[in-house]
Image (cartoon, rainbow, N blue to C red):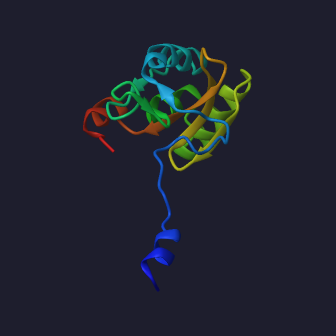
Amino acid sequence: MEYAQQKEKIMRLTEGGNVFPDATAIKKEYVPGLINDIQKIVPPSISIIPHIGSAGFKVESGDMDVFVDAGAVSEYFGGLDDKKSKIALKAYIEKQGYQCALSGRNVHVRMPVPDGTYVQVDVMVIPNAAKVAPFHTH
């Protein structure tokens, strides 16, 4: 196969934000407001931990990752296992009018931003989130 043909077959990988087709890149100036907004839509006993390698540490990002502690989520929803508590968290957020999706440990949330568009915030349900967060750098 010639180089020109091979070049056409290259798949491009873009950074995050691909769960919701209308999600736009998150501008750095939107990050503090998004963290505040996502904290308001999770149960009050669950703390949002911003991900050190995600939005807010770059000019803009395809999505923003935040951690929540799996134990706190489970406790809030009556001791459900990780999978069921993640499903319950998704339902809790959806009841507040937000579009969500599940994949792996993530509850993806479509969040509005001041310019009238939407961005993707990935709420990662992680065991021992406060201890793990500083070391999670993907």
- The residue at the far bottom in this view is 1
- The residue at the far left in this view is 135
Residue appearing at x 54%, y 20% in the figure = 38
Residue placed most toward the observer, 105 or 27: 27
Percent coordinates x, y for residue 138 in the rendering: 33, 45
- Would residue 135 appear left or right of 45 to someone viewing this image? left
Percent coordinates x, y for residue 50 in the rendering: 39, 26
- On the question of residue 67 being in view, the answer is no
- On the question of residue 26 being in view, the answer is yes
Quadrant of res 49: top left
Quadrant of res 128: top left
Number of residue marks: 0
**Vertical order, 24 against 21 (above or below):** above
Percent coordinates x, y for residue 9 in the rendering: 52, 71
Residue placed most toward the observer, 83 or 137: 137
Residue appearing at x 45%, y 23% in the figure = 48
Residue placed most toward the observer, 59 or 45: 59
Residue appearing at x 52%, y 69% in the figure = 8
Residue appearing at x 58%, y 37% in the figure = 108
Residue placed most toward the observer, 132 or 111: 111
